[in-house]
Image (cartoon, rainbow, N blue to C red):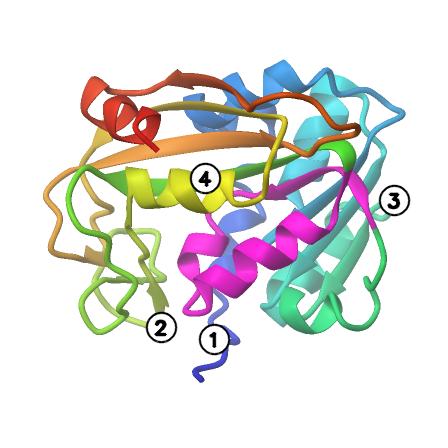
Amino acid sequence: MNSNIVYRTDELARYFATHRVTWDQFYESERVIISRLALNASRSVLDVGCGCGGLGLALREKFGVTDYTGVEINSAAAAAGRRMNGAARILQGDILDLSRGELRDWAFNVVFSLSCVDWNVRFNEMLLAVWQHVAPGGHLVATFRLTDGPSCNDMARSYQYINFEGVRAGEKAAYVVLNAGELMEALLGFDPAGIAAFGYWGPPSASAMTPYERLCFCAVAIRKRATESDGTRLDLELPEEIRSIMRTR
């Protein structure tokens, strides 16, 4: 089985040192979903694929969150994150390894995977790993690229250059695109208490090589059950083509 890519590029550290470090630098889909979580200083956060830990700075600025743990596979970005936010806990490594080691048995009120799980070749294992760190009654907040057509989790066919100037050169990351119905089926398999989503159509990244001409960029909050209850509440603010597929699952 292919391992997750340990990115060597310094592009990640240079870009995330100044981007996605304040609340208004995050995407609308992310801000809408995060604003519904009632975050405050008592909430613990795990941010998988944290870059330079900018989300921690933004959540502290906006909601007063101080208990922030970041995981980043790129060593230069993790080191920059420690310099930028000395109060944060920034771990360098693959979440699949850390879940079996340093983070084993750790649970958080909110686990974030923003542009992370769908950048990795071991997508299914990554999704399960981040869900396992959500405390009962807590949320997994993740972003996905959705389509109303077939999924593609084949890096030979769909990948993105790690280049933030839109240049198709440098190291490559997986560019996983999911059929909306298949994603919903996977999320319902967690037997969550609720699933909220917000998203919109847009073109693929300029640095992506992918067969899709448009994608639904979507942020999702999946709430883990604290007690047994009936059904799973759905709140899907998505394009009709995407929402209709997800509601049939």
Q: Earlier in the sequence, mark 3 or mark 4?
A: 3
Closer to the chain start, of discs 2 and 1, is: 1
* Rendered location of residue 71, percent (x, y): 69, 58
Name the kind of residue labelled 4 in the image: Thr
Image point (50%, 67%), residue name: 10
At 77% across and 54% down in the image, what residue appears?
Answer: 83
Give percent across and percent down for residue 2.
Answer: 43, 82
Q: Are marks 2 and 1 in contact (CB under 8 Å)?
A: yes
As shown in the figure, which amino acid type bears the numbered disc 1?
Answer: Ile
Numbered mark located on residue 171 in the image:
2
Residue kind at label 2, given as amino acid type: Glu
* Residue type pointed to by label 3: Ala
Q: Which residue is mark 3?
A: 87
Q: Nearer the viewer, mark 1 or mark 4?
A: 4
| Residue 45 sits above or below residue 6 on the image | above
Q: Is residue 52 magenta?
A: no
Q: Nearer the viewer, mark 2 or mark 1?
A: 1
Mark 2, Cα crowd under 10 Å, few <14 / some 14-19 / many 20+, is: some
